[in-house]
Amino acid sequence: MVAWAKLGAVIVQIYGVTTVADAAGVAALSPDHVGVVLDEGIDTWDSVDVLSARQIVSELRGAVSVVALSLSTDLARIRQTVEEVEPQIVHLARAESLDPGRVASLRELLAPVQLMTTIPVRGPNAFTTATEMASCSDYLLLDTAHPTTGVVGATGHIHDWSVSSTIVESVDVPVVLAGGLGPDNVAEAIARVHPAGVDSETRTSRHDDRRRKDLDAVRRFIETARATAPTSAA
């Protein structure tokens, strides 16, 4: 299988931009992807309303690829999110609860917008889910389920990177590693997992306000990720 990371520098994805000021600051640091979470009526701490999302995307457009996260499993709601945000990539946070056939149909319907699907890494069973979703996704994102609440994403916790490494070696789509990554551990994560990309939200957010980005942490995350040789394990 393709070791995507050896094809070039890792993709750097920054999530949780909630203000225009942070969008401008993050864009100036030139990550590859920036994630925006639209309020779909589902409780989450990092969402923004439609007007704010459009203002943020206007600030980001042309500088980065915008990723719109959808927590919904309703295909009509997901389509609405894409129409409202107009991203380059739509990210399905709860894809594991959807039939791969429905995801494939949605992907075809939304093209040329690309599709990223979250694979929660709770244990070895994540491998099966990942291989199923790889057939209908443009990207997989491997994330952590909170050990107490079970919530997936934006937990600040890492997961078993050995499972993630196995997935990276076994699928033929780019894999973005998420879950507790920040400036201090991203180099180790790349060296151990060999992902096509790395994602950070919680550990590049401010300690005094997690809805705002710590631009120095964002800068160090990007610089460290890009300075780490994305060599294949093969």
Image (cartoon, rainbow, N blue to C red):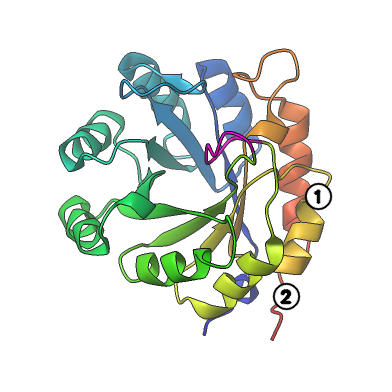
Q: Nearer the viewer, residue 160 or 206?
A: 160
The quadrant in which residue 30 appears is top right
Inter-mark Cα distance, 2 to 1: 17 Å
Give the left or right position of residue 20, taking residue 162 as reference. left
Q: Is residue 132 visible?
A: yes
- The image shows residue 214, relative to residue 119, as above or below, that is above
Establish if 140 lies above or below 158: below
> Alpha-carbon neighbours of circle 2 within 10 Å: few (<14), some, or many (≥20)?
many
Q: Earlier in the sequence, mark 2 or mark 1?
A: 1
Specify the label residue 185 is tagged with.
1
- Give SS at disc 1: loop
119 relative to 233 in the view: left or right? left
Residue at 69%, 79% (x, y): give it: 232
Report the residue marked by disc 2. Answer: 231
Which residues are drawn in magenta?
148-155
Specify the principal SS of the magenta part. Answer: loop
